[in-house]
Amino acid sequence: MTKNTHQADKPFQSFKDFWPFYLSEHKQPVTRAIHLGGTITGLALAGAAVVAGVWWLPLLGLGAAYGAAWTAHALIEKNTPATFKYPLWSLRGDFKMLKHFATGTLQQEVDRALGFTSETKPAAERPAAKALAKVRGLSAAFRNTIQKTFEAQPQKPVKNAPKP
């Protein structure tokens, strides 16, 4: 695994400083999805523990949440989870990421934290833009084909048309 990219292992002075680093460690949408699934599962099991009074369910929730996240870091991001060095800020980051996911602002927040604009974002990071460009290209080709087809055909008189 590669080492986290924070400068010279200096401790963060605030969560505001930590947050862009946290997002930089979750660049891949699949990593974020696995993280969110683990966090939601952990919260659901904690809630079930309260309702059912089963003391060990929160432990299972922690295992599900961290197990999923750490696996994603190892296999997808290939980095060391921030939890190992910044456990409380990392947990806060998990919840903030969940909030951005729930409000539909997660991708914009990641782009902002990583300094991406629509012009600077790598093509692999913007699949919707690539798909939209392909659809626009197909649409233009279809319109051109239809237009050429109608221009090439001679106009036939319409039967029983009113005379001008």
Image (cartoon, grey):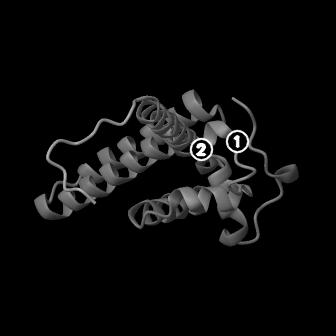
Residue at 64% from the left image edge and 55% from the top image edge:
22
Residue type marked 2: Arg
Q: Which mark is residue 145?
A: none
26 to the left or right of 67: right
Residue at 66% from the left image edge and 36% from the top image edge:
79
| Above or below, comparing residue 14 to residue 63 in the picture | below
Residue 59, x across and y down, in percent = 33, 48
Residue 64, x across and y down, in percent = 36, 42
Mark 1 residue element: loop
Residue 162 in sight from this viewpoint: yes
Question: What residue would you read off at disc 2?
Answer: 126
Callout 1 touching callout 2 (CB < 8 Å):
yes
Q: CA distance from mark 1 to mark 2?
A: 7 Å
Question: What residue would you read off at disc 1?
Answer: 122
Residue 15, x across and y down, in percent = 66, 69
Asked whether 11 or 104 is in front, the reply is 104
